[in-house]
Amino acid sequence: MRQRITPEQLEQEFSQKDVDKTIESLSKSIADLEHIKPSWLSFCREKSQLASDSFSFLFKQWVRLHRNGYPSVKQDYLRLVERQMMELKQVYIALFNLHPGLIYEQRDASPELFVWLMLEPEFSDDPFHLDAALSSVQDMHSDIAMLMFVQAKVANLDKVVAQYIEGGVDNKQWCFELLKWRQTLSIGLTKYWLKNNTLNESTLHETLTRFDVSESTEWLSQQNRDEDYLFELLLAKHNRGSWFRKRFGTQESALSSSKLIIYAKLLDLKEFDQFDPTSHKAPIQLFLSAHPKWIDITINHLICLDDEDEATEWLFSLYTIYGDAFPLKPNELDIEYDLEEAKRIIQDWYETQSHLPNKQLRCGEVMSYQTSIRAMQDPLVPKDYREWIWRQLCINGRVYMPWHWIMPCYQQDWVFDKMQQQTAASERFDLRDQNATVGY
């Protein structure tokens, strides 16, 4: 795995002025294109645009595959998309060799393409190109930029990012999140930045609480923002069930948001075992609890739906419960079958499945710590569902392992392997019903 960055490695810093100088250098190189023969420039830009259009389609597919589930190396389509992206890169290498400005002008025209190129080995060996990539983050969707940088294999990336934070660049908060999800942020460095007021105080305490730093847990507890820091506070508390009841009450109707309701279901608190399929985020409540008595309610609700997007959420929720035993793949809706056909298939399946176990299931197996980890490695379990499973594992297992859907496959595998080794966490998770009853 990557090495964690410590305060001792911050021997220099990069300020916003350095970022602005990088942008200025890019602009000068683009302006220099006017010295190329107009017919040649037009020809090159035409080729660049054609490649850019192809890249845009492939890149959207690449992001979609990561959002939709675990980026398994066994996914043929994902491998095909990545191979075709690499083939397109050759076009841009040729254009760069003709004039760097032909690549640099993509910073405004197609920021995703520009950043992707700058992070590739053929370009990233030049420190200027890493600076150029980091300078473009603000022009992109935060999640997409994070996905690209977390996946990057650029030498010294983490050290440079830490030096950007130290220098106080405009997007230093995003840079901090990047180090966190690349798993290169050390507790010592986080405390150092807290001491020096380098970053938002609440962000730093939130991060340190996840790593069981008692002073930060105390700080969060004193902010009167328990709902905002609910994951961190529940993670830190041994009596989380009792604390939740005391803090938010025992009536679902009194809970102020769908987030609180989902956490109540996640904790398996008996006072919140009712289920309303019309409530906000009900599909997430369903698969987190996976109570067999809720399935009948869900099927009856699903077969009456006309909204395809809402129906799709229920399909993914049911798949997360039943796995391959579910009669269809949620991602094939509108490809292999339409909504009406899907509803008929599900209704027929459910009416003839009297042998289905009367137990909480996760991807077709009895819900447990280990089967929950395996569910996170399923390419058909979407990112939102995987995020909630991860929270459930951390809170009910009382263990914290940094994980995010944007991580590359090998990094996720490393996290899952470490989680599987936590035997005490596994035991606590599997005893969650008894623990919820007594308040743990």
Image (cartoon, rainbow, N blue to C red):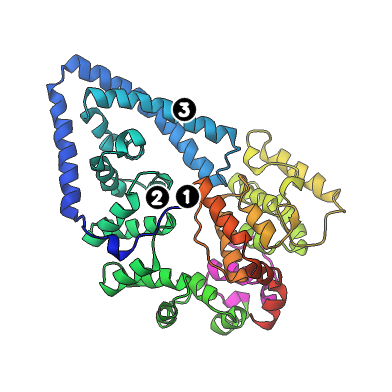
Q: Earlier in the sequence, mark 3 or mark 1?
A: 3
Q: Earlier in the sequence, mark 1 or mark 2?
A: 2
Kind of residue at badge 3: Gln
Determine which residue is flagged by label 2. Answer: 146
**Within the magenta stretch, is there residue 256?**
yes
Q: Residue at x 82, y 45 (%)?
A: 348
Rendered location of residue 165, percent (x, y)? 27, 59
Residue 406, label in figure: 1
Question: Mark 3: which secondary structure?
Answer: helix
Kindly report the distance in space between the C-alpha atoms of the residues bearing marks 1 and 2.
7 Å
Identify the magenta region: 252-281
Give the CA separation, mark 3 to mark 1. Answer: 21 Å
Q: Amino acid at mark 1?
A: Ile
- Magenta span has 67? no
Q: Residue at x 87, y 53 (%)?
A: 355
Left or right: 284 in relation to 132: right
Residue drawn 65% across and 52% down?
314
Residue indicated by mark 3: 84
User: Tag 1: Cα neighbours inside 10 Å, few (<14), some, or many (≥20)?
Assistant: many
x, y percentage for residue 70? 57, 47
Percent x, y for residue 404?
49, 55
Q: Is residue 429 above or below residue 62?
A: below
Q: Residues within 10 Å of mark 3 (few under 14, many from 20)?
A: few
**Foreground residue among 319 and 96:** 96
Instruction: Answer with left or right where residue 161 lies relative to residue 151.
Output: left
The residue sitting at the bottom extreme is 246
Amino acid beneath label 2? Met
Could you say which quadrant of the image residue 206 lies in?
bottom left
Q: Tell me what residue is drawn at x 49 percent, y 61 percent.
A: 402
